[in-house]
Image: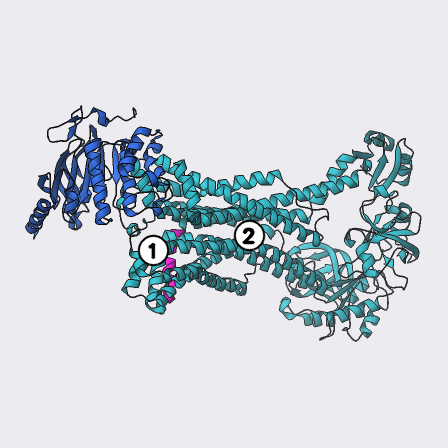
């Protein structure tokens, strides 16, 4: 753990609104005036038009918006999977823009966790091996106490030796969450994590994500189109046509639905 | 990543099956050739060691051959138990007790060897009876004894060719030995040998083997300074071994090794393509791992490790298969009589090491470029839901440049090889062209598929789809076709080479022996040179046989000076009657002039002789022995023509050199007569004439044909195996590509493409790709084949190149069939998948 340049959860402190801060003061994710355009001339598409966003430590953020709003693009840019056309992204103190591939890779290993909508796991590895993969890639030995805690939290103790093909969709996503948490990253990015799940498994995964935020102090940024999923978060930002147009704290499904309706009304 | 790599190998071995197969096949060939080579070397050394074991010293003369005095000197040395004289070459003629001369079809004459004075010093193994112990006894090879139905104790007469008197001495056959007839048809004791078979001026021994405890130095001293070089028994064993090894069997081993390396190249191509496809399929997995934090280097190392493990496993299987191959080949070689009977497959450590090394190297080498490409997969790919939409990158300029350069270099090298008859340059050129093919594949494939697939459009929507699909992914199509192209290219090279050899040999033979049979005399002439005359009455006897046409009498004579306007020549010429010449020299060979003008005072000149005389045409004058002669005609031919490089009228030759009987008789069978009957008639006529030698054109042609067939069979077998690997490669790659397009196919089916149409599309695709490969391979094969033939055999004059169009068309048709057959299993699988299933997310 000492190799990680980023602070561990022990050193965060509580904020009045229930989120936690890092002693350094820098937020988990900071985006300043991000733009992203594809193509040129007649086929030019502006996916993001000047998005600024700050995600403090310990926050569960949901990014919502209709399709074409640019929410997936925003997630890719925040996570370092894609480069913005202009603007800045910082994870903690580290600015993503000028990083070499090697340093980006190290960042992904140590400071960022991913949960995708589908195809999260390597099909030839067992659940345990999938969870430990990031540590093994870094050449680090797992902290057994932490590992046990994560496995416990996610209820995977009896599934550790199964391969993904032997797990249900919900179980696969839980393994993916465990893998994302194992390195105690600065932030976990989740792209529609419950998109392929039935409502029961989906609810399970979402409450586990929320538990990781509340009990482990994890920061989570989630993209979703489902108002119910967004209601698990602590803060929701609404994206439309590449801009943040609305924001909500402590959302409930009804309020979210209402705001979404207003968005689409505006578009129409 | 180690764990990831190993787990991938364990669970996903199927996708790497193609790589394993190719590597295993290549390793099998390599292991087999190394094992076989080792086994042969061991067997030969074991046998020759046994043979040379008894020899303490072997003396070979520096100047004049050894005499019987030398033998006596050495025998008197202390420690010498026996001295065995050896001779390189001596002819022997044997006559059966019923008066018939002993002959073997296809063998003009026999050679004799010196029988051992003591059994230990024999260089032939005894199979029955005993070695000769006193004068008047001899041994013969078992093969000859069987053919003549001799058993130990039978009698035979040996002609006294030393004095040429025609007398014969009685001999008893005491036993039979191992060995081929052409390596020695009879073994006589030294005394009989020199007395009967060596002319007085030719007497002497070419080597002396000394048995006992004497040292080579002692032998050298005893023989006198500078008279001989003497080696020890061990050195003799080595010499024997390398002589035995330097025979046709080494050629076979060399051919096998060469082919093994070709198999390695094919395996490399197939493995490279297979890795490319497998890694393309795994893009999402690679992207995921990169998201989770794997460095590019880690990804690369993992792929290489996977390749190494696959290579190792495949090499192990290949080694076992190779041992099997070697065992089969051993049995075959033993039965063909080409290898010693003691040949047996042994464990060769070299073979194991080489096999494993080659297997791992090929696999890893093939994986390097695809692994590097895999590291360039951007992590964002993991989030893309539809990887199939990612189109093949456009073929880069670098690739075109490199490919063109390789092609140019290869072509230049091949041309150089053909011009300078350098086989190695030819092989190098061939490899470069192959590499160019692999590089340029994707570039060439697109337009070519359009051309080849054009007729496919006639098959309706399915056909149009098929034609379009091949051009869409040039890299994938090139991958499928490369291995097949190489296989077919090799086959074509082989076909062209052998067709050329056949044509040349036929032309040479029929150019040299237009007659069915040519009879000459092998009697000793009084002056030791010149052309012995055939026995009187032979021509008449042959003319009387109903199976034969009247023989043409030819008289050959040496002429010292033939003076032409622009050159002089001294050579052997022929004389025969103009009527005979006109009857048997086809008019198509007449280059200029007219055969009707040939009579006394004129001469017919072949093109080669005409060139050597500074260029002659009909109407020119040449002078021989103060006579001016007019060139009646120039005909194509050379010094091998039975009508001579120059043909004179018998009257002129008689005037210059005196009257004489014919030196050759050219005999044709009557039309419709079986060659065997004609030959029997000739044998009857010469039954009492041991000096007459019969050259049997049909027999020689038959032997040549069976030889070429033998080579074709061997070459065909090996190439067939390479083709098999290529075909399997096509099949598996097609399967992989169909799997890759699962969703696309599902959409098509949902839109209304029937099962039958899907079948048609996929099989047409397979056929188009296979035909494409075949056309490329054939074009390459013809080009390289022609160049290669010149490179390997161009040193011969009159090399004719033949392109066997019929056989090549057959290969093309076969390729189309292969393509269709290879596409059937994946087509069946694809058509069975319900559209809905394939549309579901993974």
Q: Is residue B506 left or right of residue B389?
A: right
Q: Are marks 1 and 2 in contact (CB under 8 Å)?
A: no
Q: Is residue A233 left or right of residue B69?
A: left
The residue that mark 1 highlights is: B741
The residue that mark 2 highlights is: B788
Ranked by sequence position, the earlier of labels 1 and 2 is 1
Q: Secondary structure at mark 1?
A: loop
Q: For the stretch drawn in magenta, what is the main secondary structure?
A: helix
Q: Quadrant of the N terminus of chain A?
A: top left
Letter of the chain in blue: A
Mark 1 vs mark 2: in front: 1
* Residue B555 located within the stretch drawn in magenta: no
Q: Is residue B462 above or below residue B257?
A: below
Can you give x and y, in whole percent of width and height, for residue B105 in the image? Answer: 77, 62
The residue under the point 47% across, 61% down is B818
**What range is drawn magenta here?**
B441-456
Residue B710 in view in this figure: yes
Comparing B77 with A191, the one in front is A191
Letter of the chain in cyan: B
Comparing B49 with B692, the one in front is B49
Q: Chain of mark 1?
A: B
Q: Distance of mark 1 from mark 2, alpha carbons?
A: 42 Å
Can you give x and y, in whole percent of width and height, for residue B239 in the image? Answer: 74, 39
Can you give x and y, in whole percent of width and height, for residue A191 in the image? Answer: 22, 43
What is the quadrant of residue B671 in the picture?
Answer: bottom right
């Amino acid at each position: 753990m000492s190799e990680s340049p980023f602070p561990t959860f022990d050193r965060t402190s509580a904020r009045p609104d229930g989120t936690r801060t890092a002693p350094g003061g820098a937020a988990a994710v900071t985006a300043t005036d991000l733009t992203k355009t594809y193509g040129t001339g007649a086929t030019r598409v502006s996916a993001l038009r000047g998005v600024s966003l700050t995600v403090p430590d310990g926050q569960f953020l949901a990014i919502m918006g209709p399709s074409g709003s640019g929410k997936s693009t925003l997630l890719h840019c925040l996570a370092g999977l894609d480069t913005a056309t202009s603007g800045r992204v910082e994870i903690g103190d580290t600015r993503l823009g000028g990083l070499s591939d090697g340093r980006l890779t190290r960042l992904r290993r140590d400071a960022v966790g991913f949960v995708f909508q589908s195809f999260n796991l390597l099909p030839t590895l067992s659940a345990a091996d999938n969870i430990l993969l990031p540590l093994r890639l870094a050449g680090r030995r797992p902290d057994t106490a932490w590992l046990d805690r994560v496995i416990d939290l996610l209820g995977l103790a009896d599934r550790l030796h199964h391969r993904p093909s032997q797990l249900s969709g919900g179980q696969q996503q839980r393994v993916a969450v465990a893998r994302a948490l194992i390195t105690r990253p600065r932030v976990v990015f989740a792209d529609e994590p419950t998109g392929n799940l039935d409502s029961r498994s989906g609810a399970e995964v979402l409450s586990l994500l929320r538990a990781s935020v509340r009990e482990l102090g994890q920061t989570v940024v989630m993209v979703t189109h489902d108002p119910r999923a967004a209601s698990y978060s602590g803060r929701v930002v609404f994206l439309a046509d590449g801009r943040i147009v609305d924001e909500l704290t402590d959302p409930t499904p009804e309020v979210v639905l209402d705001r979404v309706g207003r968005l689409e009304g505006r578009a129409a | 990543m180690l764990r990831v790599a190993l787990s991938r190998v364990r669970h996903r071995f199927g996708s790497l099956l193609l790589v394993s197969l190719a590597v295993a096949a290549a390793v099998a060939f390599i292991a087999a050739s190394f094992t076989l080579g080792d086994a042969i070397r061991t067997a030969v050394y074991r046998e020759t060691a046994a043979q040379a074991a008894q020899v303490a010293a072997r003396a070979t003369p520096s100047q004049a051959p050894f005499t019987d005095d030398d033998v006596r000197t050495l025998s008197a040395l202390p420690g010498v138990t026996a001295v065995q004289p050896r001779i390189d070459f001596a002819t022997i003629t044997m006559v059966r007790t019923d008066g018939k001369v002993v002959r073997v079809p296809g063998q003009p004459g026999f050679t004799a060897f010196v029988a051992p004075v003591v059994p230990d010093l024999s260089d032939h193994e005894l199979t029955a009876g005993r070695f000769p112990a006193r004068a008047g006894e001899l041994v013969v090879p078992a093969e000859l004894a069987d053919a003549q139905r001799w058993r130990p104790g039978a009698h035979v007469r040996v002609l006294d060719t030393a004095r040429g008197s025609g007398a014969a001495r009685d001999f008893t056959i005491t036993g039979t030995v191992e060995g081929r007839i052409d390596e020695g048809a009879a073994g006589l004791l030294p005394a009989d040998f020199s007395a009967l078979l060596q002319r007085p001026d030719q007497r002497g021994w070419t080597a002396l083997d000394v048995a006992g405890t004497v040292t080579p130095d002692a032998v050298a001293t005893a023989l006198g300074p500078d008279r001989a070089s003497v080696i020890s028994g061990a050195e003799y064993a080595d010499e024997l071994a390398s002589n035995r090894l330097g025979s046709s069997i080494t050629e076979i081993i060399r051919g096998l090794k060469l082919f093994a390396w070709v198999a390695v190249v094919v395996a490399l191509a197939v493995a490279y393509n297979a890795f490319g496809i497998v890694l393309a399929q795994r893009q999402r997995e690679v992207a995921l791992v990169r998201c989770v934090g794997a460095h590019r280097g880690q990804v690369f190392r993992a792929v290489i490790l996977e390749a190494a493990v696959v290579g190792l496993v495949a090499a192990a299987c290949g080694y076992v298969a190779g041992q099997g191959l070697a065992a089969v080949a051993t049995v075959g070689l033993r039965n063909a009589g080409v290898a010693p009977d003691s040949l047996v497959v042994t464990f060769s450590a070299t073979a194991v090491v080489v096999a494993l090394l080659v297997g791992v190297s090929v696999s890893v080498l093939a994986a390097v470029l695809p692994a590097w490409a895999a590291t360039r997969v951007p992590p964002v790919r993991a989030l893309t839901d539809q990887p199939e939409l990612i189109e093949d990158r456009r073929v880069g300029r670098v690739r075109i440049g490199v490919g063109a350069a390789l092609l140019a270099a290869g072509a230049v090298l091949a041309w150089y090889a053909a011009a300078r008859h350098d086989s190695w340059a030819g092989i190098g050129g061939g490899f470069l062209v192959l590499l160019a093919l692999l590089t340029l594949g994707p570039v060439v494939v697109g337009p070519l598929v359009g051309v080849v697939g054009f007729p496919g459009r006639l098959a309706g929507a399915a056909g149009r789809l098929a034609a379009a699909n091949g051009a869409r992914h040039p890299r994938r199509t090139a991958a499928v076709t490369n291995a097949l192209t190489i296989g077919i290219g090799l086959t074509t090279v082989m076909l062209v080479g052998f067709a050329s050899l056949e044509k040349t040999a036929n032309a040479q033979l029929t150019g040299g022996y237009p007659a069915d049979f040519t009879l000459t005399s092998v009697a000793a002439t009084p002056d030791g040179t010149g052309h012995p005359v055939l026995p009187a009455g032979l021509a008449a006897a042959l003319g009387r046989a109903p199976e034969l046409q009247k023989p043409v009498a030819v008289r050959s004579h040496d002429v010292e000076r033939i003076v032409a306007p622009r050159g002089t020549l001294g050579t052997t010429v022929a004389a025969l009657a103009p009527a005979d010449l006109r009857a048997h020299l086809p008019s198509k060979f007449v280059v200029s002039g007219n055969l009707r003008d040939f009579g006394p005072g004129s001469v017919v000149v072949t093109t080669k002789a005409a060139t050597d005389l500074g260029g002659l045409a009909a109407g020119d004058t040449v002078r021989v022995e103060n006579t001016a002669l007019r060139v009646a005609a120039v005909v194509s031919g050379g010094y091998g023509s039975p009508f001579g490089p120059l043909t004179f009228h018998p009257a002129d030759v008689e005037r210059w050199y005196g009257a004489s009987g014919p030196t050759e008789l050219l005999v044709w069978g009557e039309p419709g007569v079986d060659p065997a009957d004609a030959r029997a008639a000739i044998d009857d006529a010469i039954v009492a004439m041991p000096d007459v030698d019969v050259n049997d054109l049909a027999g020689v042609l038959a032997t040549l044909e069976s030889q070429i067939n033998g080579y074709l069979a061997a070459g065909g077998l090996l190439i067939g195996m390479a083709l098999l690997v290529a075909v399997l490669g096509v099949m598996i790659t097609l399967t992989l590509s169909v799997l890759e397009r699962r969703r696309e196919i599902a959409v098509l089916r949902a839109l209304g493409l029937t099962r039958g149409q899907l079948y048609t599309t996929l099989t047409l695709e397979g056929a188009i790709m296979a035909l494409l490969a075949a056309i490329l391979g054939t074009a390459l094969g013809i080009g390289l084949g022609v160049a290669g033939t010149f490179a390997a055999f161009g040193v011969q004059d009159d090399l004719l190149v033949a392109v066997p169009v019929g056989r090549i068309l057959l290969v093309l048709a076969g390729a189309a069939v292969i393509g269709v057959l290879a596409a059937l299993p994946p087509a069946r699988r694809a058509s069975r998948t319900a559209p809905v299933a394939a549309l579901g997310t993974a």
